[in-house]
Image (cartoon, coloured by chain):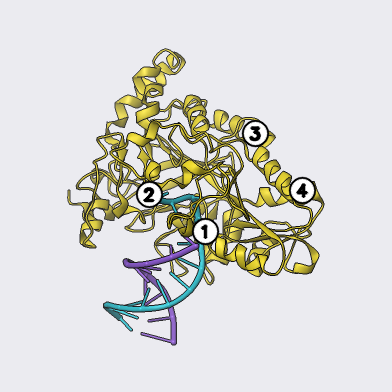
Chain colours: A yellow, B purple, C cyan
Amino acid sequence: MPPLRRMEKGLISVDRWTGQSQAYFLTHLHSDHTQGLSSTWAKGLIFCSRLTAKLFPFKFPNFNLSLLRVLDLGAWHSLSLLSPSPSASQSFITVEVMAIDAHHCSGAVMFLFRGEFGCLLFTGDFRWETASKRAKIGRTMLLDALKDDVVDILYLDNTYCNPSYIFPSREAAAQQVVDIIVSHPEHDIIIGIDTLGKEDLLLHISRALKIKIWVWPERLRTMHLLGYHEIFTTKTSLTRVRAVPRYSFSIETLEGLNTMRATIGIMPSGLPWVTKSLERGDKPFGSLLTSHCNKSKWSGNGGNHIDKPNANLGSVGRFHKYIYTVPYSDHSCFTEIEDFIKLVQPTSMKGIVSSSSCYVDPMYYFGCLCGANQAVQRSLHKHKRKERDERVPAVCLRTPFSSGGAFAESERKRGRTVKGKHSGTHVSRISALRRIQRGAKIMEDGCLN
DNA sequence: GCGATCAGCT
DNA sequence: CACAGCTGATCGC
């Protein structure tokens, strides 16, 4: 069947807004998950968490809010959708869905689906820490949700699916930030953040230092929507700690600020942060981040870099006299991804992140934790499993890298060329596709693409 | 003029 | 390179 015809008959879409489906699911409100969604949306109902629904009109003013449906966390919800089967054109099928806290940014959830197509878990972006109270609650919620099912396909946030990505818990990283601030008692502090996310970091700083945090006016509105009314301010006179948009955070900004007041910048990020001036060849300050700043070590040369250890990812870095980097990440690090897969024990899985320069198919490192390799651990699920296996062949995988799929088709139409290796290898470098959204769609035949 | 899309940049 | 985002140019309406 031609791709277009199949797209017309999509069942449900997750973080995908092109094509037609019967129901749409939004994991969270970061822009790379909302490409194609706009204030004029009218294609169908959108299911999301309560917090995301609350934030929705802020990102999409004048959006028709009657199209939003809130899914409460940890509870199964049933949807009745038109059967995609041609032989039962007027009948309905039931799809069950549960939203589970993804511990990413505010409002972010994973979606667990059950239906004729089997059991699918779509993580969206997620962080899977082990120690915090919130993490333990999340773990319990997921195990409760999975107790009767085997996940046939896990759609995984593989942003840091590479053993060189190791960093501490957000609580530990937040304390590193506090320590930096405390060690600069006379300095102004600026911290680079995005329009959503890392609120917990700012709360931690505020509580630890008993200080208000400055944010820009729109961010203050977001903070108020999230229920934080006392901690944040837009008056610079009230605090020396300011959270600023990441795009306005640069060496040039810091140097400019320092002509007026002594100021340091702190960049919370799971990624090495390299500025233009560093790429131009300026020497980093100190030596902590030298490997990050050496571009050649990060540019892919056939994927050989993926196993290189990087000892600097877990600690505070300083590559400019005014700028510190702290490994505070809202995505799971490598070992957390591993823990999560061991917990879920999916039959199969696919990475949802295609934009990384060093995209790693999670099956490369963790395929051994899936499917037949888990026969012993899965013995308790044996009957359930067999039952599923008979139905699941209809579920196929579609990734941005598969040839001939809807993605490839649309990219060709835009006159772009897919470069680099095919996903048949464990590493794909496809910079031409760097801007495509992270989404998936369940098709009439149970296919997800 | 407006929204959607894209290039370029941080 | 880019966790996610902004700005400005361009195109079609």
Report the disc number at residue A43: none
Q: Is residue A424 left or right of residue A306?
A: left
Specify the subunit that label 4 lies on: A
Q: Are labels 4 and 3 assigned to the same chain?
A: yes
Circle 2 or circle 1, nearest the eye: 2
Q: Which of the marked residues, 2 or 4, is nearer the chain's N terminus?
A: 4
Report the disc number at residue A68: 1
Circle 2 or circle 4, nearest the eye: 4
Q: Amino acid at mark 2?
A: Ser
Q: Amino acid at mark 4?
A: Val
Residue A187 image point, x, y percent: 74, 58
Q: Is residue A351 left or right of residue A239?
A: left
Q: Separation of disc 2 and disc 4 at Cα?
A: 37 Å
Q: Amino acid at mark 1?
A: Leu
Badge 4 density bin: few <14, some 14–19, many ≥20, Cα 10 Å: few
Circle 4 or circle 3, nearest the eye: 4
Q: Is residue A278 left or right of residue A73?
A: left
Q: Which of the marked residues, 4 or 1, is nearer the chain's N terminus?
A: 1
Specify the subunit that label 3 lies on: A
Specify the subunit that label 2 lies on: A
Residue on which the image places disc 3? A137
Q: Separation of disc 3 and disc 1 at Cα?
A: 27 Å
Circle 3 or circle 2, nearest the eye: 2
Circle 3 or circle 1, nearest the eye: 3
**For this rendering, which residue is in front, A382 or A133?**
A133
Q: Separation of disc 4 and disc 3 at Cα?
A: 32 Å
Circle 4 or circle 1, nearest the eye: 4
Report the disc number at residue A355: 2
Report the disc number at residue A182: 4
Specify the subunit that label 1 lies on: A
